[in-house]
Amino acid sequence: MDFAQLKTSLKTKTEPVYLVYGTDYFLINKAVSLIQNAMPNVEVTKFTEETSGEAIVTALSTTSFFTNARLVVAILGDKPSFSAINQYIKNPVAGNTLILISYQEKPNANLKGATTVNCNPMPAEILVPLIAKQIAPHQITRDAAEYLVEATGGYYTLIDNELTKFMAYYADLPVWEIKHLQPYVTKTLDYQIYELGAAILARQVSAASKILAWLYSGNTSEYMIFGGVVSQIRRAYYATASSADINVLGKILGCSPFAIKYSRRDYGAKAADVKSCYERILELEYQIKSGQMTVTAALDALIYR
């Protein structure tokens, strides 16, 4: 289940064992808090990644004298052993709950019977309604909410921080539009590079030059900038040249399906331009690797092509 589904399920019951995983630390911490709040009068025990599965099971198998239940929260290491925990799942102690935390996008956890909670960045379809609920009694337009999701990479942590900031700017404004958010939103590096690639594809020389200057002013490595633009143009090329499922394509390209969806939205009608730019960027990449051109010169060649 995802984070939103967890909130709904906890209204009914808590499960014996949860595997909470993902790269959005805010969502993980929030998920743990939600589970704990759903267990009134609970004693909480926390373990680090060095703790063995046997020690975790021992803690779960004991009942507190002072509370109704025990909640055990354990962080998983790189190569955890689940044999003891899998045995426990077959016959868990009634009322007690175990939360295992993995800070990996896709944990390699051989758990049989645990309830998994995906705390990776959520897709816009889930985030936009959540954002709307967070800023009540205000309203936010859909395009403004989608822009916020794109600019923050879909990380709930960053979205929450941005919404808190906007509350100070727009406390008296009943409806927030994209024009209100754009001047103040703090964009992730990935999104800034996405904007640079979009400006290059649109042949917007002035806009691309400004974004590049801004990236340089933040001491962003030119290799990181060029590599990011290569990845973005490659994504745009395959998104427009292929009709494959966005989940399959995202896995091949190493990006989220969300990114493929927006590449198709932004460049679906510009497939020829994308192909031409992709061919050019591959040529420049070869020249960099063969020592014929510097990265700085290659970026300039892209912008002023």
Image (tube, helix red, strand yellow):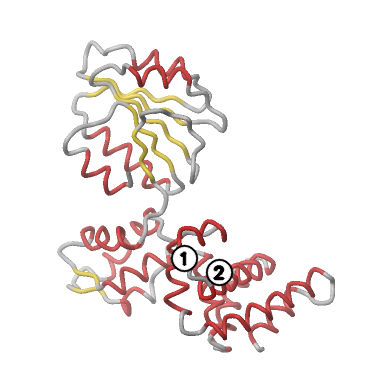
- For residue 248, above or below residue 195: above
Residue at position x 80%, y 77% in the image: 293
Q: How many numbered marks, from 0 up?
A: 2
Q: Secondary structure at mark 1?
A: helix
From the top left corner, tell me how far across and down residue 68 is, in percent.
20, 19
Is 103 on the left-hand or right-hand side of 96?
right
Is 2 on the left-hand or right-hand side of 7?
right
Return the residue nearer the eye: 302 or 206. 302
From the top left corner, tell me how far across and down residue 204 is, in percent.
54, 88
Return the residue nearer the eye: 175 or 194. 194
Residue at position x 39%, y 38% in the image: 20
- For residue 202, above or below residue 106: below
Of the 4 image quadrants, the one containing the N terminus is: top left
**Contact, CB < 8 Å: mark 1 with mark 2?**
yes
Occupied quadrant, residue 141: bottom left
Q: Earlier in the sequence, mark 1 or mark 2?
A: 2
Of the 4 image quadrants, the one containing the C terminus is: bottom right
Q: Which mark is residue 235?
A: 2
Q: Secondary structure at mark 2?
A: helix
From the top left corner, tell me how far across and down residue 206 is, in percent.
56, 89
Residue at position x 31%, y 59% in the image: 127
Badge 2 crowding class, 10 Å Cα cut-off, few under 14, some 14 to 19, many 20 or more, is many
Is 284 on the left-hand or right-hand side of 218?
right
Q: Amino acid at mark 1?
A: Ala
- For residue 250, above or below residue 19: below
Q: Amino acid at mark 2?
A: Arg
Is 214 on the left-hand or right-hand side of 98?
right
Q: Residue furthest right?
A: 291
Residue at position x 37%, y 59% in the image: 123
- In the rendered image, which residue does mark 1 sit on? 259
Q: Which mark is residue 52?
A: none
